[in-house]
Image (tube, rainbow, N blue to C red):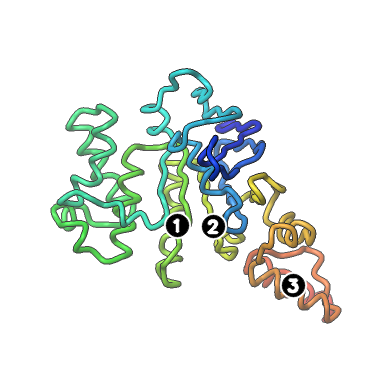
Amino acid sequence: MSIVVKNLSYVYSQGTPYAAAALNGVDIEISEGEYLAIVGKTGSGKSTFIQHLNALIKLQNGEIRVFDIDLTAKKPDLKRLRGTVGMVMQYPEYQLFDETVEKDVAYGPKNLGLSEEDVQARVKEAITLVGLDFDEIRDRSPFELSGGQKRRVAIAGVIAMKPRVLILDEPTAGLDPVGKREILSLIRTLKQTTSPTVIIVSHDMEAVSENCDRIAVFSDGMVLKTGSPREIFYDETVLKEAEMDVPSVVKIAKALEKRGVVLSEKPVKKAELIEALTRRRSRNE
């Protein structure tokens, strides 16, 4: 397992009249190579959970192990942890700060103590990987770029650290349909090339159903259920308790079922729905 979390609990403003529990006994294991979606309504603990995975939030109660890094240790190796777990926060373009794209992307690798030559190689590679022309964009101010370019530069700054685990909080938030497709395609590319384990927090059930291997449903600071998209999106009990929406493909399949057209395959992806309908039509001809 790349990440093992046991009995993780966290209380904001602990010991004050304003104390608020955000996590309550979270247990989950995430395998290397997984594409995991974390879903749940606002306030269910999703963002608090992921910020524990690279120690942006200090552990209060429970256990977290990321590969061989034990966060319950007195002095966990945070530099190595943050080189292992890359975190792309929601609207990462607002976190750009340096005068040029090249300097902004170089910030993380420099903090890893790499040589100038290695830093430059990583910066060029990362900018190219996110689909931007290094020579054309390297000396430009990140604040002069388009919204989509800014988001790619922000992701490049994380990728330049070569994390084995890439975590993205609402990666498609605020993007138009074309921008969403491009970012999701980029994430798939990064999973294949640099970061084999990907975790996304998302309210976009279309993106989750089309891209993720497994879903963890959070509710009231706990993991309500984990399973494949098919197991989650056709579990009426979980959907009701977590107040979850479902992707359009599942809505169509359920609407067809009410009309007597039952698809035994229970599709969650558009391609699966088309295949199921085509197969059913062929049987009926």
Residue depicted at x 33% and y 37%: 161
Q: Residue 246: x, y in percent?
A: 66, 66
Residue depicted at x 24% and y 40%: 107
Secondary structure at badge 2 equals loop
| Residue of label 1 | 171
Depth order, front residue of 35/201: 201
Secondary structure at badge 3 equals helix
Residue type for callout 1: Pro
Mark toward the start of the polypeptide (2 vs 3): 2
Left or right of 227 in this view: 61? left
| Residue of label 3 | 253
CA distance separating discs 2 and 1: 7 Å
Between circles 2 and 3, the one closer to the viewer is 2
Depth order, front residue of 149/5: 5
| Residue of label 2 | 202
Residue type for callout 3: Ala
Quadrant, the N terminus: top right
CA distance separating discs 3 and 1: 27 Å
